[in-house]
Image (cartoon, rainbow, N blue to C red):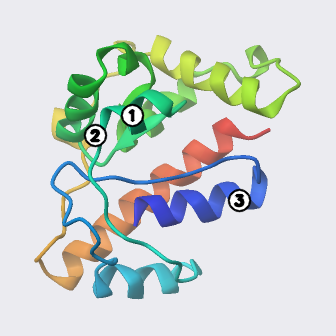
């Protein structure tokens, strides 16, 4: 859900952006869950070709921004590529810190450079605002759970992606 929501929302404002997803325990080749697909349709995110893949060091190393659904996912990415720690976040962590960034300081005219500045600015805000509970930065995994669990995950992801897109795009 996070990959599809992010890709569609960014495409609207940043067609230059590329979004991909990978899992720490991916069922490689599997399509998106039907419950997730139904929620994405409600959010006006069209169906697209999707096949699960494993998170690899090459994927992490190549990314300008790595977002995990949870702190556990963030940690897995950083274990693969320790030098990516400053550009690797839990999605809700990024959304929590993004409002602390002074957008007027993001001066690059080139949109890719501006987005990279935004990621660095968010990383610089770590430690300035803590969540009430560390788990507040996680999106609970709805896999093999109820429709309500999928709805909660979709809502949390959608809210966080809106903040992400607003910061990364002028």
Q: Which residue is mark 1?
A: 58
Q: Which sits earlier in the primary sequence, circle 2 or circle 1?
A: 1
Q: Residue at x 82, y 19 (%)?
A: 108
**Closer to viewer: mark 1 or mark 3:** 1
- The alpha-carbon separation of the residues under discs 2 and 3 comes to 25 Å
- Label 2: state its secondary structure: helix
| Residue 20 sits above or below residue 87 on the image | below
Q: Residue 8 or 19: which is nearer the viewer?
A: 19
Residue 133 in view of the camera: no
Residue at the disc numbered 2: 137
| Residue 152 x %, y % | 29, 68
Picture coordinates of residue 95 (x, y %)?
46, 39
Q: Is residue 151 above or below residue 35?
A: above
Q: Quadrant of the N terminus?
A: bottom left
Dots 2 and 3: beta carbons under 8 Å?
A: no
Residue at 29% x, 16% y is 82
Q: Earlier in the sequence, mark 1 or mark 3?
A: 3
In this rendering, is residue 126 above or below 54? above
């Amino acid at each position: 859900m996070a990959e599809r929501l992010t890709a569609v929302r960014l495409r609207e404002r940043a067609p230059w952006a590329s979004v991909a997803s990978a899992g720490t325990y991916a069922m490689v080749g599997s399509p998106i869950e039907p419950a997730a697909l139904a929620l994405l349709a409600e959010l006006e995110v069209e169906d697209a070709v999707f096949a699960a893949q494993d998170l690899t060091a090459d994927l992490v190393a190549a990314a300008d921004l790595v977002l995990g659904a949870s702190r556990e996912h963030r940690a897995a990415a950083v274990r693969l590529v320790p030098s990516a720690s400053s550009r690797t976040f839990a999605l809700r962590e990024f959304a929590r810190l993004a409002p602390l960034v002074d957008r007027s300081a993001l001066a690059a005219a080139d949109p890719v450079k501006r987005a990279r500045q935004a990621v660095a600015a968010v990383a610089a805000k770590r430690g300035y605002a803590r969540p009430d509970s560390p788990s507040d930065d996680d999106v609970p995994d709805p896999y093999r759970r109820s429709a309500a669990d999928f709805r909660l995950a979709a809502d949390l992801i959608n809210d966080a992606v809106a903040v992400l897109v607003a910061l990364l795009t002028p």
